[in-house]
Image: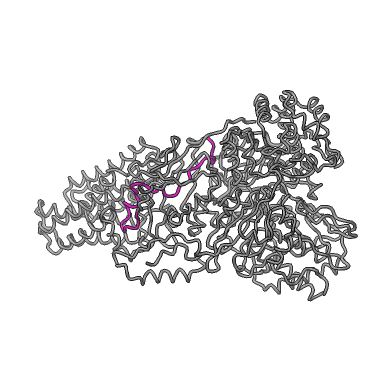
Amino acid sequence: MSKRYAFLMDMDKCIGCRGCGMACKNFNQLEPDMVWRQVYPLDERIYPHRDRAFLSLACNHCDDPACLAACPTGSYTKRPDGIVVHHQETCIGCTNCIRSCPYGAPRFNKAEKHAEKCSLCHERLDAGLLPACVQACPTGALTLVDLNTFHDDNAVQYPAGFPAMPRLNPSTRFILPRMPRLLRG
Amino acid sequence: MKTHEHLSGRRGFLKGLLAAGAAGMLGSGTGSLLRPHRAEAAPFDPSAYEVFRNACPRNCYDTCSIKTYVKDGVVQFVEGAPESTFTKGGLCVKGYTYPRRVYSPDRIKYPMLQDGRGSGNWRRISWDEAMDRISDKILEIKKRDGSLLGLGLTKYSGNFGITNYGVEGMMSSLGYTTRFVGTPCWPAGIDAQNYDLGDMWCNDPEDMVKARYIIVWGANPAWCSMHSMKYLYAARERGAKILVIDPIFTQTAAKADEFWQVRPGTDGALALGMARHLLDAGLVDMDFVRNAAIGYEDFAAYLKKNVTVEWAAETSGIPADAIRAATEDFAAAKPATVWIGYGMQRHTNGGSMVRAIDAFVAMSGNIGVEGGGARYGHLQTWGFNYHAMIQKQPAGSVGMRGASGPKGEFDFAGGEAATYSDRTLNINKTAQEILDAKDPELRMLWISCKNPFAQDFDRNKLEKAFAKLEMVVSVEQFFTETVRHSDIVLPVTTLFEEWTISASYWHYWLSLNEQAIKPMHEAKSNIEIAALLSRAMNAKEPGSCTFPQEVDGKEWMIKECNKGIYDLFGISSWEDLRKGPAKARLASSASWHDRKFKTPSGKYEFSSALCAKNGFAALPEYVEGRRPDAPFRLMTPHIQFGLHSQFINLDWMEAYYPEPFVYIHPAAARKKGIADGDMVRVSNRIGEVRVRARLSGNVAEDCVVMYEAWFRKLNFNVQNVVDDCEADMGAMKTGAPGVAIHDQFVDIAPADGGRA
Amino acid sequence: MNYEFPLVFFTVLTQLGIGLALVGAWKTCFGGSLITRRFWLTALAATLAGLVASLFHLGDPLRAATALNGLGHSWLSREGLVFGLFVLLLLLAALRPGRAAAALPAALAGLAALVVQGFTYAPVSMPAISNGFPLLLFVLTALALGMSFGAAAAGPQRLTLSLLLVVLLIVPCLWASGSAIMQDTAALWRQSAGFWAGLVLTAAALVLSLVRRQGTRAQGVLLLCGALLVRVAFFSATVHTASRLGMPY
């Protein structure tokens, strides 16, 4: 049985350092203003302390990806292991994938006028290495799992702050953040 | 099939290669108009790269061991060295920007001369012309004053690679000069630990996993020592409790079991209250206080007479029952540890607060215990030769009469028993010291590994002070505010372009830093610059500079190593470090495990005669903090995106951190008529900062927070409103007292009509 | 802010072409009035102008033809195909003006193009318009534009214009009672000057239609400007889920 790769994002461990995103820029040699992985602070209505809990999101490598469906040039493919790959060399920069992805994964490269997104570092996976962001995470908040074998009762697919899209069935799973007991002076 | 050139060259640098790749794709002939050829990515092949060992030399707990992947002479990407259990294969958000830093279009590329300081009229000059002008000036000063005391050096923590102490060496090789000594960072705590324990020596941070109770007190490792977080988490998973004590609800606090928002500057009272409860509840480790310590009875008497838990609660704002409960849990947990942060000692009473915490940990019996300890920092692994630093003054050099004291915590040379010495000025009062310097006046300033306009205090005063200087030379990589206030700027190498070696003041790993690429543009390392200057000086006046006129970076790196270092790290030669960083062979992960303290008494000193001799109380007594002179306390701690003034200026970092804020409590903002995102004016008697407000309950109502930073496109500088008020301790071990960075007070008001 | 002007002009101008084709076919088949070649060429010109505008939306317009590669899954690909067909049939109708056999296929292709557009511009990432609203808006816009420029009978013209106005007024109100992201969309549309200006111009076109018995060019121009402005709001003020990651949905 083939794997279905997914990111497991443990918000309880995440410190919002952005090391994941910068490691991605560093390895994938992104344009200076470009990011494939962004870290979003949770709104105070979701986590009561501002800028203290985060969603670290790149591509969620959906089961039924909106980007792939929207792309008129067939520049998206899905590998048997679940990774959604964007092929920059056939992309004509119509931005329909960017309009369509609910998670903002594809972004427009202004310098080269095409879309691009997280590849789950499949070149690294194929060489037996972890994705750059996962390797970079200093707290173990970002890990790579195989959804076909992954099981964790605490893991959720749609935490608050992450739009539920059952039709697309995004692969990323999340662990929710806890809060300390507070004594204020 | 032609593979997708996944990493076909650093963009903008190897355009040629990219163009060739594109041409190859066009000509591949397998595509058609409707079905263009699509390349499939081949697996990543690490063997296609040359891999070099580097080390992050910044002023950071983590001092990461780096693996640098180079192809075609170009740094392609970096990663953390997996061999170090501390770095564990991952760098931080800052470390991953290094490939941009070295190839940044903003880098200073060649020596430049500014016609009129601050004018922006820079023009390129040759290294020869730069050295000609600089050596002329030095010789002129010597002629005019009869000494080189008019030549000053300010250098601190911009690059801790050991060979960079060659900058100090360069100054010594010219004669007796003026040195800015001390540290704005951690001096009060260093002295405090020296009074109590005889040295600053912390446990191996990796042994925190063994702790059953961890108090992170005034430190924010989630931002400032990210690699330590995994040990806190591991300890917690093994059942440890984590308590964070901080005036700010930090990112570390958000990850704790419990958070105490202490009133700033009252941590000492809190620690003393906890110590008193140890006493009351009979939880004192009598074996330790009787056999391994002196002065305990006096301290216990002081606690009984002057301290109650209720008083501590009232002073610190933390409820008495919480203080009692945590104290009991801490004492019951074996081992238990306190991580004492540097933030907490940046107060007028900072040293006394660290001493109070040390005393609490000592009474609980956790000193010298694996997984325990009052952790602050260490310099146990810094036993290098300081070959680059230790240079002889030219014969006949004249300076201050008498031997000099310490030149900083990293001065391992020891005071020379010479007739003359350097003039030392307080680095924490740079502006005032320049203004006050007499006989001779400070005429020329050499700046390296430091950005005074971003880091030194009272920026407006610093501007006046710089106006007094006749020549300012900056050794830099970017056009900082300090460079703007300089006459000549010299381009210096990055970590990839020089050989050096780096140790940490927190963990116990040692990393080699290999030269991975040829220096970009005309950049030179600090020791190469020193050699060039020596050549220019000696050409004009033979014997005027003792620094070697030829240096080889690799040889000089090797000259820093010695048998002591090799034995400590269990390596036979520096070349072993090419296989990966090495960790010190420790008899125990605990500092002071043999209870042989380096104090005059050889014991833990609750009562320190040395401390009393230096003008403080012998006991870790409570000292009140600085009195406010404005409505809000201002704190200017560190953010994860920068290390002081480094990293935030890079366009890569701007992608994640584009703009600074002042953080203010929503209730306080409401009273001031400030809405989220409003432009505000943060001001006090020495200056002002204009910045956008971000409303946040993470700060107390009477507190505002700005994170220190240098943004290349913004006129943002927290030092406009941070004065040079002294912390209590620090002079003994570092040459100057610390700075009360977090005892600053400001008012805040909407600016430019608020919404901007 | 990204106004997506190429998409604004593309959708509105092609909808003008489609509207004209629908009116032309109706008149040819049922109206008994003579539709001139000039009429069909106008529809063709509007459509081609829209298609040219759409090219400006591409990073690499020279490879626009590769956009037909995704017919199996991409509504955008299908849009390309159906507009190709529509242009051909318009050309045919222009060659044989007055022939129902030529007019009807063009009108049917136009209707198909509207349906495809209704799907293309209703992405799952924009909950406020990930429904039948784009189709409704596009059909009413096409009809209103076609009738105004194509001098259709006053009754249907007024009815279409009124319906368009009602839909534009009611839909944002419906959003306001929907999810957080729909509420945000409603708020942004209400703050959008383009939306209100577009509404006023559309209303003005209705007033003109009520005053005069026949559609005039002035009415058409008013409506066209109104439609373009409303479309600016459609493309720039509709909230994308990705713009509020980390916030409640």
- Does the image show residue C165? yes
Residue A161: percent from left, percent from top: 44, 40
B373, above or below B62, in the image: above
- Does the image show residue B701? no
Q: Foreground: C65 or B94?
A: B94
Magenta span: chief secondary structure: loop
Q: Quick one: quadrant of the C terminus of chain A?
A: top right
Residue B622: percent from left, percent from top: 77, 33
Residue B253: percent from left, percent from top: 60, 37
Identified at 41% across, 64% down, the residue is B4
Identified at 40% across, 57% down, the residue is A115
State the count of labels: 0
Residue C167: percent from left, percent from top: 28, 41
Q: Is residue B318 left or right of residue C19?
A: right
Q: In the rendered structure, which segment of residues is drawn in magenta? A: A48-77
Q: In this view, does B460 lie to the left or right of C129?
A: right
Q: In which quarter of the image is residue C43?
A: bottom left
Residue A75 magenta-drawn? yes
Q: Is residue B36 left or right of residue B405?
A: left
Q: Is residue B712 left or right of residue B615?
A: left
- Residue found at the far bottom of this picture: B539
Which colour style is shown?
one colour
A117, above or below B552, in the image: above
Residue A12 magenta-drawn? no
Q: Foreground: B524 or A47?
A: B524
Q: Foreground: B204 or C220?
A: B204
